[in-house]
Image: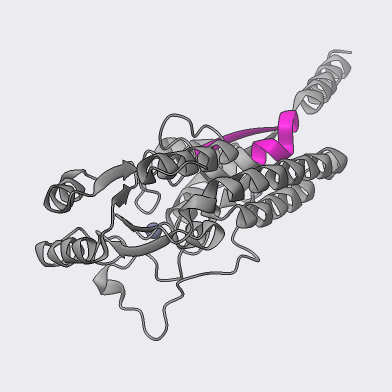
Amino acid sequence: MKKIFVILMLMLGFIARSALAELKVVASTSDLASIAKYIGGDKISVKYIVDGRSDAHFVEVLPNYMVMVSRADVYLKVGLGLDFWAQLIIDGSRNSKIQIVDCSQGIEVLGKPSGQVNASMGDVHAEGNPHYQLDPADGLIMARNIEAGLVEADPANTAAYEAGLKSFEDQLNSKLAQWQKEAEPLKGLQIITFHESWPYFSRAFGIEIVGFIEPKPGIEPTASHTAEIIDMIKIRGIKIIGKEPYFSNKAPNVIARETGARVVDLPQMVGGSPGTDTYFALFDTLLARLNAAAGSNP
Ligand SMILES: [Zn+2]
């Protein structure tokens, strides 16, 4: 009798858990987490490792990330070498059942190095530029990859994930029309940025990124390279120095003082600064800041 009671309680416990269970998703970045939430809605819970306040190239692998992943069903990776640290977290989690989704599948990769890449030079874009989230067209590819991953991990909720993807795509298309209008006065605008985060954004909106404060992606500014950037800004009459929020103001301020150009905080991921809580809000804020800095009125 006691045995039957125990089995019954176990069964009830199992039923209660599965009825309430959300699919547990962990994403490398806040961008992937934001897109996943649009698709998965209340069928999933989403956590992420890094947001726009930190440099996603350099993440310290902490034990609590491994604990988080040990309890997860799906892991969303950026790929292209950006979140190479994700594999260390996944291995450390000892979660052999987790489903890993590489969200860069199907992305047309920009900035692929031609010839040999010398890793000793510290170039963090050795597999091509990994900041593809900054073209909204790539946001749709990311969303499709995420939806496919959710469906595979949780086929019972396929209809919900399909509807989530459709709704994301509809919202993205309507925002895209708005963003293209807002970007109209920015076409051909030349700016300098700290890191090479922007080739996909540039492709999407026509802004020209003509130089970087970093001599190479991931390499600290040097005096000689800074002098070259100062000359370029003076010669071309550049007015804007874009800076991702997690970089030091030191070199940008020196350049601004020498040239009269203005330093503008340009968050390149969700959560990088106020007004960037979602993937859509990120583009709203970027275009508003660039228009304000350029003195244009879309
Ligand atoms: Zn980078």
Indicate whether residue 92 is drawn in magenta: no
Looking at the picture, how far across and down is residue 48, in whole percent?
52, 38
Indicate whether residue 38 is drawn in magenta: yes
For image coordinates 45% across by 71% down, the residue present is: 127
Tally of numbered discs: 0
User: 8 above or below 247?
Assistant: above
Looking at the picture, how far across and down is residue 296, in whole percent?
43, 44
Looking at the picture, how far across and down is residue 199, in whole percent?
46, 63
Looking at the picture, how far across and down is residue 131, in whole percent?
47, 57
Magenta range: 36-48
Q: Is residue 237 left or right of residue 272?
A: left
Q: In this view of the protein, which residue sits in the foreground, 277 or 229?
A: 229
Location of residue 158 (image quadrant): top right
Instruction: Name, please, the residue furthest toward the bottom.
Output: 115
Q: Is residue 222 left or right of residue 297?
A: left
- Magenta-drawn stretch, dominant element (helix, strand or loop): helix
Q: In this view of the protein, which residue sits in the foreground, 102 or 70?
A: 102
For image coordinates 13% across by 47% down, the residue present is: 257
Residue 201 seen = yes
Q: In this view of the protein, which residue sits in the foreground, 246 or 121?
A: 246
What colour scheme governs how the chains and residues are painted in the rendered image of this protein? one colour
Residue 22 seen = no
Quadrant for ligand 1 reads bottom left
Quarter placement of the N terminus: top right
